[in-house]
Image (tube, grey):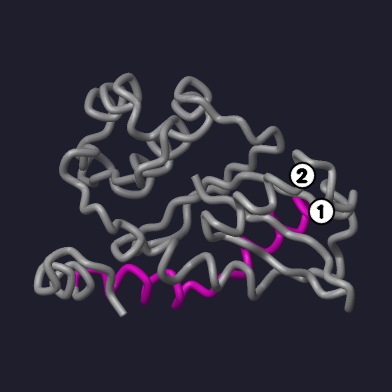
Amino acid sequence: MEYLVWKLSKDGRARTARTKGAINKAKKKLQKGKVSSRKLAVELEHGVCSKALSPLVIFEQRTVDRDRYIKEVLSVALKYGNHVFGNDWTFQQDGARPHTHRITQQWCHSNFPGFIDKDHWPPNSPNLNPLDYYIWDEFVKVIDWNKVTSKPTMIQELKRAVKKIRKEAVFESCACWTNRLYRMSQNNGRYLK
């Protein structure tokens, strides 16, 4: 899953956090009640291919288990992939717990025309995930943070902003994937710089 956590800073500008450390820090503050009511979080699931972005799935309630992931995300990904590519495509995902669960893996093997399972995906997958190395930054740039004043307005703005991501950015993010795969193979699977 990809998390987008936002808050308004003292100068009124919105900030986002997507790193695991920043998200965990925000979660701790929320649990201790040391954060203002203006801090909100939603969980996003999104896909990318060379032709377009998949539909955006937004979870207002942040807990997503394997059953919810299969029902609300994988079913959307399957429908979208089959519509765009027919039966000639491969699905990959990151190592989030709902993704790596045995039942999720079985569902993916049984339903997707091609699937890269958790045992065959590189450990530094952000380097090979166009969402992580390209699209999320594009997404954050097109969000009009002045329109975000509450959780409902944030969700509305996320839905609007995803439609504004440049088609060229989507294509470029996927076009460099093969080169990134080669560079990782030459780098013994370590992070790319």
Q: What element carries label 1?
A: loop
Q: Quadrant of the rendered structure where residue 172 is?
A: bottom left
Residue 39 tag number: 1
Based on the picture, tell me whether residue 164 belongs to the magenta stretch: yes
Viewer-proximal residue among 3 and 188: 188
- Of labels 1 and 2, earlier in sequence is 2
Residue 141 x/y as whole percent: 64, 75
Residue 142 tag number: none
Q: Is residue 165 above or below residue 162?
A: below
Q: Residue at x 88, y 54 (%)?
A: 38
Q: Residue at x 36, y 49 (%)?
A: 84
Quadrant in which the C terminus is drawn: bottom left
Q: Give the range drawn in magenta.
A: 154-178
Q: Residue at x 44, y 61 (%)?
A: 131
Mark 1 neighbour density, 10 Å: few (under 14) some (14–19) many (20 or more): some
Q: How many labels does the image show?
A: 2
The prevailing secondary structure element of the residues shown in magenta is helix
Based on the picture, tell me whether residue 70 belongs to the magenta stretch: no
**How far is mark 1 from mark 2, CA to CA?**
9 Å
